[in-house]
Amino acid sequence: MVKKTKKRAKLAKKTTKAKNTNYTAKDIEVLEGLEPVRKRPGMYIGGTDVHAMHHLVSEVLDNSMDEVVSGHANKVNINLIDSTTIEISDNGRGIPVDKHPKFKLPAVEVILTTLHSGGKFSNKNYQTSGGLHGVGVSVVNALSKKLDLEIARDKRFYTQTYSRGVRKNKLKTISRGSIKKGTKIKFTPDDEIFGKENFDSSIIYNMAKAKAYLIPNVEINWSCPKNLVKKNIPTQDRLHYAKGIHDYLSALVNPNEPIFDEGFYFKANIDDEGNSIEGIINWFDAIEPINQSYCNTIQTPLGGTHENGFKNGMFKAFKDYSKIKFERKASQITQDDIFGSSASILSIFIENPEFQGQTKEKLSSIEPGKKIELKIKQLFEQWLAKKTKTAEQLFYYAFNRSQIRLQNKSELAIERQVKRKKITLPGKLADCTISGNKGTELFLVEGDSAGGSAKQARDRQTQAILPLRGKILNVISASRDKINANQEIVDLIQALGCKRGDNYNSKDIRYEKIIIMTDADVDGAHIATLLMGFFYNEFPKLIDDGQLYLSVPPLFKISKGGKIFYAVSERHKDDIVKKEFKNSENIEINRFKGLGEMMPAQLKDTTMSPENRTLLKVQIASKDKKKTKKSVEALMGKKPELRFKFITENSKRVSAENIL
């Protein structure tokens, strides 16, 4: 066996050497036109999943909204024709059709077939715009099985058709069109790229609704076939909100009632160049914080410099106000105490925004962030000075939150002393009904969507659910103050009901089993790792007692006729297909995108029911404790050089086969 291994190693060495020797100029590929988009769609739209497919819709819709913001349009029509085809039109100026001086082609054809082309690189046509990369509609064209274009401008009508980025005919002039003025684009995403993914009417409708809230003078007309309606989405609707983001905030927090009748609303220019900001924030008794931010009507779910400037400006103004009136008490309040249970909407319009990546999920422009901080500080100072009674109530609201946080920091019993004396369960805990901890289980679930499914699937008597927002803090590398100030961790400790570290007493814990239940993907594994790191650092005795488990949710559902099987990995799926279905045809294989995508009954049968589920107990062998400590510090600690060393030493042992 040893001899064979050496022989194979030599052969591999020779093969590698041969490949390197034959590496010549002819091996260099040059991708032209829209080829890079089709070759690597993830670079342009973040992937090929359903989220990326809907990003195509946002690219086209954003172009129409740019016409609205610039004052050239006031109507946008969105027609979801079927599950894979959508039509978006506006009554703007229409894409130019005259010959481009460099390419000698109609300008619209250059825009649709050339990356980094468009009319938004200067402020001649658009003062502010969301699509400054010049790749939006060309990417949509490249990744569409079919794209039909209609333009109406200067009382003339034009049409053209494309397929996978290639024109099927020259730009035609027609006698009449279906729009009087503007641009209409109808497209079908390419199933060679996106597979069997379908449009989700609720995602597109809510995307359009957010745009209508941000621009009160726009009218967005929505239509959708009845068979595609889901989650109370209408078949037809006229989206127009005269009160703009005031209406938006009310819709977001419904049915929660704010503490203050009137929150902090602002609308102002941030400089002399026409860049502007609008926003609103209000505070509540006990809600998960809501932060919706936009730049030039583009949603930025990962925030960015505009969100940071907004929060920093408000916090600085609040601290200055508090120091004068409340002196020492003010020093205990942090930014999290101010924003921890608030809901806010922030919308900015700036020239030449810089985003992190083409999907534009985070604003990275530095200068606007600084200007926003200064402007918000000034505006919030004026608001606090004008509304003296509300300002005092807000201080005590934040001060009470700081006291709760500090009590947790000292690991004292938490007694909420807020103005309304309203006591809530930690986080979004759905507790079990029986008393005592015998036979009870606490499921730690990633996100509200998965949490909702788990709450419906659970045995209410013995199973409790605690949804956690995204990836929790890495406690291995965080300071004690940062750990104790983190709301997700505070909620988790409250749910467990026991003290940490050396003060831990197994008799105090509220549940017999703690089960980490995350999605069966890379993100889920990351979250599970962070949670295991949390228990390893804060509750090591709990692991020693054998009370920490990992659930094993399925990744695939495999069915044919009445036979249904679930697989936890690619390899497991292939084994089932081979063994149970004899590799026969017409097998239906569905990949679960997350626990939130599973029906409650499926989640119960496969992952939560003690009769059918598989649980992995988290254990550390006594002889491996020093080795484990060293590995945890290297992989999750403060020293990046240790991680680099670990990766370089172990990367050769990892293969795609091992991962699967």
Image (cartoon, rainbow, N blue to C red):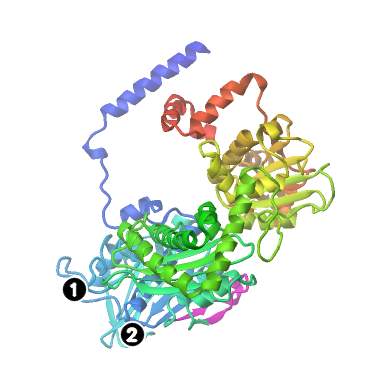
Left or right for 299, reference 629? left
| Circle on res. 207 | none
Write down the residue under mark 1. Answer: 99
Q: Gap between marks 2 and 1, in whole Å?
A: 20 Å
Give SS at disc 2: loop
Q: Nearer the viewer, residue 336 or 174?
A: 336
Q: Are marks 2 and 1 in contact (CB under 8 Å)?
A: no
Write down the residue under mark 2. Answer: 181
Residue 469 included in the magenta stretch of the image: no
Residue pictured at 29% horizontal, 67% vertical: 351
Mark 2 residue type: Lys
Stretch of the chain drawn in magenta: 219-237
Residue 226 included in the magenta stretch of the image: yes
Q: Quadrant of the C terminus?
A: top right
The spot of residue 226 in percent (x, y) is: 60, 76
Q: Nearer the viewer, residue 440 or 314?
A: 314
The spot of residue 254 in percent (x, y) is: 62, 72
Q: Is residue 340 above or below residue 620?
A: below
Visible residue check, residue 556: no
